[in-house]
Amino acid sequence: MPGSGGAGRRVSDTLRNPLAVAALLAGTLVLGTALLGPVIWGEAAETNDFTSLDQPASAAHPFGTDKLGRDILARVLVAARLSIGLAVAATAIGMVLGVLVGAVASMSGRRLRRFLAMMIGIAVAFPGLLLALFFAVIFGVGPRGAVLALGFAMAPGFARLTQTLAASVTSQDYVSAARALGVSRVRILVRHVLPNLAEPLIVNGTVAAGSALLAFAGLSYLGLGVQPPAYDWGRMLSEGLNSIYTNPSAALGPALAIVVSGLAFNFAGEFAAQTVGGRARVHRKVPAHVPADAGPRLSTSSDDAPGTVLSVRDLTVRIPTADGLIRPVRGVDLDLAPGEAVGVLGESGSGKSLTALAISRLTHDPVRVDAQRLTFDGMDLRGRLGATERTRLGTSLSMVFQDPMSSLNPTMRAGDQLAEVATEHQGSSWRDARARAVERLRAVRMSAAERRSRQLPHELSGGMRQRVMIAMGLMGDPRLIIADEPTTALDVTVQQQVLEVIQSTRERTGAALLLISHDISVVSSICDRVLVMYAGRVVEDLPVADLERARHPYTRALVEAVPTMQTPRDERLSSIPGRPPDPAALPTGCPFAPRCPRADTTCTIEPPLVRYAAGSGAVACHHPVEETS
């Protein structure tokens, strides 16, 4: 069965990882002792033997006996449950309080953020043990007071860590985009910030748990922790130190238990952090159906769409706000045939990138996506996808973003990130996946591919990082490549190289290409057909060869705004007057009417009609340009 094979492979990979084996053995030893210690050795730990009082180590008592003749080893094993439980509880309290305060400090307004940062800084400046003693006096003597004292003493450290790490995450473009889309601060925190902090928080949490064992021992040693007749490792350590000269092994037993448990926490934390950092995925929920707004739209495809890789009908994107729904994408239709290259042109804010994100299921709450049809390679992307469909989507749809630095994990080597695609979606071994990653880097003309695969993203140039993104899409069997402004941040020479790589990749794999750009020259050099978007709608669909004879005034204005070698140097460059409309306040008629020189009263009242021309696509305009001016 497929499931059993995948499970067996994961077990085999785990057993080959020394850190995983160490974490498994140490964790099993410590947790097993904590759970079973009182059951197995409870009676021996409480049995008084007045004939063997305060005896040194022997075969019968490896760590000797205490002043009542009780076996110290048995008591150490029984005390594991209370010692570990109290340390874990204190760490959990510290993590929850610290993460909460640090997250609020990073996401709050300027004044509250500065105040919380100042308070965190003051708290961190005090030694942790001093804070623990301070809180222990407040909460009182005993295990409950000690747990609260340690938890509150550990909270400032976690708060500072969370605040510092969250600051780097909240500065990323995807968080800024979420804010611009109206995503609440709480949702940004839960969906964007905290998942990116999981790995360092886990590592620091487990290290803190190990330190909490020692801190708890210190409190119990001072008489502020566990009180008689209960006992933990700290209290046993205190009793053992009182007889250090007559029976040194009495203190050695609890001391070894603290050291071994601390190492177990560290091993387990490192392994868990690697697992979270390498395999954690967020499966976005498919938004509920929202009826599409009525009105004429430009259909760029036939109804049955035979033999298509991508088929989209009436794609609509809505963003709920306090003032109502915003529709940045409205009624987009699109078909892509195998091997076909379609460019999407338009000014910033026209809905190009959001259309691509909606097609590839990369939007998330509160963005709502609806379509009468949204199929890719035979899969209906409107519903929830199973594991098989997700794997197929991950290997057959390739995304190339504008800024690869924000799409690549800065802490993973380039080859490892490519190899992860094969291990996650194709079940390849790590060795085979790494070999395929190097092969894919060579396929996109990466020089010294073997050496580049071992480098981190910041060690690569912008063009190299873009090639890595293209190579990542080639790790599977791409049927569709969506390139969103792939050359915007590159110089002209590197732009041409990246475009050549995309073109050769498309020709070699037979994949369809959806190229999003505001640069007409880029689209003209690589695409067969062009969709022009304005205010969230497709306003014209035409072959690339007909761009100079575009019929929509907006398309014509975009073409005329591009200077050529024949443009007189003393002539003022053409531009489009005005600004694109606000998606939250779209005009009643044609959205381009306020900027259009051909507009009349009809354009401001009625939505534009869709007109078709033989061999020249379609245009949504009341007064299209009928001949070249």
Image: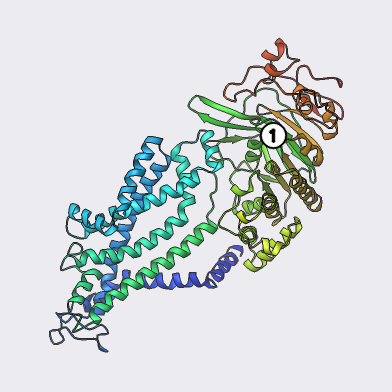
Residue 217 is situated, as x and y percent measured from the top left of the image, at 25, 67
Q: What is the secondary structure assignment of the residue under circle 1?
A: strand
Q: Residue furthest front?
A: 570
Mark 1: few/some/many CA within 10 Å (<14, 14-19, 20+):
many
- Dot 1 amino acid type: Arg
- Res 113 seen here: yes
Task: List x then y, in percent, for residue 26.
Answer: 41, 72
The answer to whether residue 586 is above or below residue 459 is above
In-image side of 368 versus 207 (left or right): right
Q: Is residue 337 left or right of residue 103?
A: right
In terms of depth relative to the viewer, which is nearer, 251 or 528? 251
Residue 258 placement: quadrant: bottom left
Q: Nearer the viewer, residue 114 or 596?
A: 114
Give the residue number, with chain letter if any, for mark 1. Answer: 313
Vertical relation: 516 (above or below) 144: above
Q: Which quadrant, please, contains the C terminus?
A: top right
Expressed as whole percent of the image width and height from the top left, the position of residue 523 reads 77, 38
Residue 150 appears left or right of 312: left
